[in-house]
Image (spheres, rainbow, N blue to C red):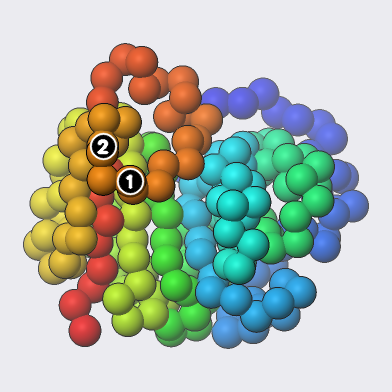
Amino acid sequence: MRVRNKPWAKDYMAEHTERMVVEPEPLRGDWQSRFPSDQPLYVEIGTGKGQFIVEMARRHPDHNFIGIEIQMSVIAAALKLVVASGLTNIQLVHTDGVAVNTIFAPAEVAGIFLNFSDPWPKKRHIKRRLTSPVFLSHYQDILQPKGQLQFKTDNRGLFEYSLTSLSNFPMVFEGVWLDLHAATDGVEDVETEYEQKFSSKGPIYQVIAHFPE
Ligand code: SAM
């Protein structure tokens, strides 16, 4: 996601420390202290401008949500949305998602969402893909038993890579959708910014999987 530098971003983030965390490591194992109620914790990595995570928090008041985003100008836009929403079951973290195992304690997380992750098509960048084995091993560290990893994308190449990567890890598939918007099984689909932008150009793919016990 390319965005213009937002000169107001740093100050705005500093003004909203009730919703925004920039030093997440000290909260490892204690994330529930950031929310009014102790509830299952769901994490989105690469949350972009926050449309998905805010709508999820609105629909699921009995869950807590954390959006992680690496770009300051992008997460500042998400923060605006979170503040405007008035929702208290959502927190944002400005950091690199590769470090999730230093941010969350073992089994602290009930589920992980990856939406329209950057494809990193070049071979030498495979390790940066959010479904590469390094990331998967960190997800395994922090997910509760049977905790779900949910990944959706419009990028067929990244989807094929991800199916192979998850299967080889190994992970257990709970569902695979080759055209999520044509699904008739009642699966919930909260649309992201990218999904709304690109779904007219082709199918949306999704996989839900968990690590074996
Ligand atoms: N999820 C949003 C959506 O579906 O509209 C945004 C998709 S955008 C293509 C991918 C986002 O992931 C970008 O905002 C990018 O900065 C973020 N991102 C990429 N790698 C990341 C990482 N390692 N940790 C955190 N965020 C990351």
Mark 2 is on which residue type?
Ala
Residue on which the image places disc 2 = 183
Q: Residues within 10 Å of mark 2 (few under 14, many from 20)?
A: few
Mark 1 is on which residue type?
Gly
Q: Return the x and y of residue 154 as percentages of the image width and height.
A: 30, 30
**Mark 2 secondary-structure assignment:** loop
Residue 116 appears in the rendering: yes
162 relative position to 101: left or right: left
Residue shown at 49% from the left, 80% from the top: 108
Q: Return the x and y of residue 165 as percentages of the image width and height.
A: 16, 55
Above or below — where is 54 with respect to 205?
A: below
Residue on which the image places disc 1 = 186
56 relative position to 175: left or right: right
Q: Residues within 10 Å of mark 1 (few under 14, many from 20)?
A: few
Q: Return the x and y of residue 125 as percentages of the image width and height.
A: 28, 42
204 relative position to 7: left or right: left
